[in-house]
């Protein structure tokens, strides 16, 4: 909740234009914000902030990040506690409704999500219109957007009941759609959801079971994937979340807004980072594996080299990413449970991790392994192909997008998004006849 501060910001101009006072607001935690909403009306000037790195586009009660402290809170709860004591659907309830559920609320919510996991049978025909080798994120963008064509009773973004039904459907059906896109790509039959299983175990069964044999999920692996979902559920006003808010501000339906988030997440600088980290490891492995790490590190340190270190450091976290610490523990648990510590790629990853945590070059620059580095290793160990990593991220982040969209729609101050620009093109000019150009 924003509260006005007694302190005002005074804006003055050296060109003789009259100055003005700007209100300052304080949040619960974090930096104060200067309210510039009346700036253009009173001065005829805009602010210039490429990437909106110094601009608060909204006020929110959902997620808070302190990059300097390495702190991530969902509705005030530290991510470390949520990952240790809660499962993903409890975190979904927290993000959507604002509080962790009690036993009765949890059971009701789990039942609701469980009974929404099937998708319309015609979605299979829509899926078959894609090439078999299509990237899963291309498929997911289409499938999520297409949900609005099947569920007309939940497409009014201004109707709270519609938004709630759409939220339940999206959370429930994303695992089904991700599994369907995977099965389609590898040429295997689709596996229908099973209501007796947990959310994450059900997803793994849909991914890896076949009509020939049942899939018995390993409890350690299920918990690891559930933790990946929790750690990726929301992350404040990142690019994809801002895209969902901006898209939803036009009044479009929730499915279309979430599809826009999926499309944005696809970018290698955002959701594709864990895919890029595994691709980097595979490139090193092909070049000679552990023996070539020294050469790779030298190239990374060389300013004239184009070689990049993927899966290390973070734009927001200036110290250790709190999600990475949790994912590191999970990573080692999974490798131990599956007996994969001797796998060449994983040995390479652990050797690279050791260098990054001890080498002065990386320590001084705070290039610690991030959540993408470890989640990529875990997903590969589970058997999830690299091309599907970002779709898994989209599955997890869907609940955060929904919570942010609902919050925006319920905000009495919200307006359709309309960023301004500094125009640096041609001045007004006349069109000459074609013979004189």
Image (cartoon, helix red, strand yellow):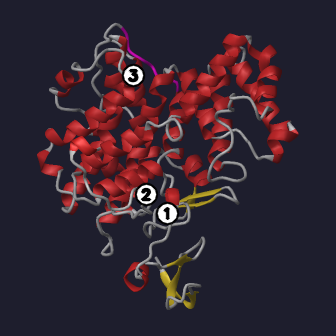
Q: Is residue 150 above or below residue 105?
A: above
In the picture of the structure, the residue carrying the numbered disc 2 is 94
Secondary structure under tag 3 reads helix
Quadrant of residue 282 within the rendered picture: top right
Q: Crowding near pointer 1: few (<14 within 10 Å), some, many (20+)? A: many
Q: Is residue 281 above or below residue 289?
A: below
Residue 343 placement, left or right of 247: right
Distance between mark 1 and mark 2 Cα atoms: 7 Å
Q: Nearer the viewer, residue 307 or 33?
A: 307
Q: Nearer the viewer, residue 264 or 125?
A: 264
The picture places residue 332, in percent across and down from the top left corner, at: 68, 30
Q: Which element type, helix, strand or loop, lies under badge 1?
A: loop
Q: Residue furthest top?
A: 212
Q: Indicate left or right for 385 with 345 as reference.
A: left
Residue 215, magenta (yes or no): yes
Secondary structure of the residue carrying tag 2 is helix
In the rendered structure, does residue 153 fall within the stretch colored magenta?
A: no
Name the foreground residue: 403 vs 49.
49
* Residue at 82% from the left image edge and 27% from the top image edge: 298
Circle on res. 207: 3
Q: Is residue 160 left or right of residue 339?
A: left
Q: Quadrant of residue 425?
A: bottom left
Q: Which residue appears at 29% of the width and 28% of the height?
A: 193
N-term-proximal mark, 1 vs 2: 1
* Closer to us: 11 or 79: 11
According to the image, label 1 marks what residue? Answer: 75
How packed mark 2 is, by other alpha carbons closer than 10 Å (few <14, some 14-19, many 20 or more), is: some
Residue extending furthest left?
Answer: 152
Range of residues picked out in magenta = 213-218
Q: Are marks 1 and 2 in contact (CB under 8 Å)?
A: yes
**Number of residue marks:** 3
Residue 189 location, quadrant: top left
């Amino acid at each position: 909740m924003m509260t006005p501060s007694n302190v005002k910001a005074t804006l003055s101009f050296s060109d003789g234009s009259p100055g003005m006072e700007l209100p300052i607001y304080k949040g619960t935690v974090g930096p104060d914000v200067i309210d510039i909403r009346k700036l253009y009306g009173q001065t005829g000037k805009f602010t210039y902030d490429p990437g909106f790195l110094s601009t608060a586009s909204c006020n929110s009660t959902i997620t808070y990040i302190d990059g300097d402290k390495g702190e991530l809170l969902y509705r005030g709860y530290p991510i470390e506690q949520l990952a240790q004591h809660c499962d993903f659907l409890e975190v979904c309830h927290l993000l959507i409704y604002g509080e962790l559920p009690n036993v009765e609320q949890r059971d009701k919510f789990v039942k609701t999500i469980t009974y929404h996991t099937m998708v319309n049978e015609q979605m299979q025909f829509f899926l078959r219109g894609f090439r078999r080798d299509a990237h899963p994120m291309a498929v997911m963008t289409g499938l999520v957007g297409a949900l609005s064509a099947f569920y007309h009773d939940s497409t009014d973004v201004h109707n709270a009941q519609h938004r709630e039904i759409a939220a339940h459907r999206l959370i429930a059906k994303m695992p089904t759609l991700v599994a369907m896109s995977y099965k389609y790509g590898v040429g295997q039959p689709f596996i229908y959801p099973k209501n007796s299983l947990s959310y994450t175990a059900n997803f793994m069964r849909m991914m890896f079971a076949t009509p020939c044999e049942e899939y018995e999920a390993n409890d350690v692996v299920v918990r690891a994937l559930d933790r990946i979902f929790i750690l990726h559920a929301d992350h404040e006003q990142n690019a994809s979340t801002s895209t969902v808010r901006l898209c939803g501000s036009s009044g479009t339906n929730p499915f279309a807004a979430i599809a826009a988030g999926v499309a944005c997440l696809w970018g290698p600088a955002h959701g594709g980072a864990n895919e890029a980290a595994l691709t980097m490891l595979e490139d090193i492995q092909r070049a000679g594996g552990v023996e070539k790490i020294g050469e790779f590190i030298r190239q990374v340190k060389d300013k004239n080299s184009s070689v990049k270190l993927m899966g290390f450091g973070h734009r927001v976290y200036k110290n250790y990413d709190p999600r990475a610490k949790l994912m590191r523990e999970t990573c080692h648990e999974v490798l131990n449970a599956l007996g994969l510590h001797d796998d060449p790629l994983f040995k390479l990853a652990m050797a690279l991790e050791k260098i990054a945590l001890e080498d002065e070059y990386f320590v001084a620059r705070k290039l610690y392994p991030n959540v993408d580095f470890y989640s990529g290793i875990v997903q590969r160990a589970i058997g999830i192909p690299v091309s599907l990593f970002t779709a898994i991220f989209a599955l997890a982040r869907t609940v955060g997008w929904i919570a942010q969209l609902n919050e925006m729609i319920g905000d009495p101050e919200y307006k359709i998004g309309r960023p301004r620009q500094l125009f640096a093109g041609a001045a007004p000019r006349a069109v000459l006849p074609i013979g004189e150009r």
